[in-house]
Amino acid sequence: MSSQLFDAIDFLEKEKGIDKDILLEALEAALISAYKKNFKSAGNVRVDLDESEGAMRVFARKTIVDEVEDSQQEISLEEAKKIDPNYDLEDVIEVEVTPKDFGRIAAQAAKQVVTQRIREAERGVIFSEYADRAEDVMTGIIQRMDPRFVYVNLGKIEAKLPEAEQMPTEDYYVHDRIKVFVTKVENTSKGPQIYISRSHPGLLKRLFEMEVPEIYDGVVEIKSVAREAGDRSKISVYADDPEIDPVGSCVGQKGQRVQAIVNELKGEKIDVVQWSEDPVVYVSNALSPSKVVEVLVDEEEKATTVIVPDYQLSLAIGKRGQNARLAAKLTGWKIDIKSESEARAEGLLADNNDNEEVTYSDSIDDLFE
């Protein structure tokens, strides 16, 4: 039985990738527990595991006394000197107390404990493998669904995609492959838990890093992301090198790069705008595709009043205020949008014919409108 246990440990190390030392430690603890339970021992015992011989031996620590009152914890001086003549009173020695049928009894009693330790070790291996995947994108396969969760197989672990993290415009089907953003990885009492999302802004950021080599290489930097999952998003980008067009790098030739991300997000509209440290320029860019006449900045309140042509007012605000809301999230500035005629009436804009409309556009076609 002992040799079979050691063979099983070798097998588990190879097949499960669990360190043999962890398994031997678990086995030792289980055997000590089994001995104390089956042989009513309360003494300090130690189990010696000899892999080369495939043997298990139990040793009890006993104190040398003149007269033995507790045979489990004491040994007479006479008996001790048979082991080693140099022993004296009050010395503590180890005496082998391995029962003849200990292998069978120990194997049965230790099975549950060892199984538990193996399960814990497997969880540790899985946690180590996924611990550094937080804030990363992983590809998984949908296994099943219920009203609360979509269950996604990520390889060695199944993650739950809760309803709150799903894209409201997206349908999920069993066996579909999807990319998910890992928000958190935890080692809980129930094992490793991976929390995933399809609606997190981080998913959009990571997809751009995967699709745009200039971002991956650090030539183009993503400054900010604002997202209303499944509907529309805005992302601001910047490049130190003035000869590099950060927006063009993200959009790609004929829009191929951004289109690949749009397809992954099932048609979610994405506005790529250029970041600027000048709030006038940045806020104007963020309100794309609308045109801007002027931006009035209140540095103290970190607020802006944006004036747009009358015919662009609804476009600047967006459906249900979405364009303005996303622009505010993207820039971190409060944005109050007024039409040109309203601004003139309030005295925010000079009422003269010399005033020119300032526009910000990434499209050449807009110049000819």
Image (spheres, rainbow, N blue to C red):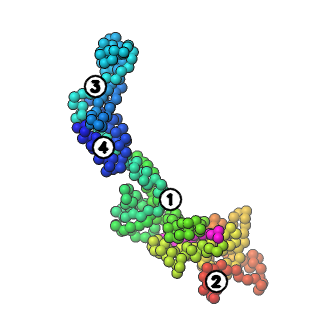
Q: Position of residue 2 (x, y in %)?
A: 25, 37
* Mark positioned earlier in the residue sequence (2 or 1): 1
Q: Nearer the viewer, mark 2 or mark 4?
A: 4
* Mark positioned earlier in the residue sequence (2 or 4): 4
Residue 311: numbered disc: 2
Q: Secondary structure at mark 2?
A: helix
Q: Residue furthest bottom?
A: 368
* Mark positioned earlier in the residue sequence (2 or 3): 3
Q: Amino acid at mark 4?
A: Ile
Q: Which residues are magenta?
A: 230-241
Q: Position of residue 355 (x, y in %)?
A: 75, 82
Q: Residues within 10 Å of mark 1 (few under 14, many from 20)?
A: some
Residue wearing tag 4: 9
Q: Nearer the viewer, mark 2 or mark 3?
A: 3
Q: Position of residue 259 (x, y in %)?
A: 49, 76
Principal SS element in the magenta part?
A: strand
Residue wearing tag 1: 135
Q: Secondary structure at mark 4?
A: helix
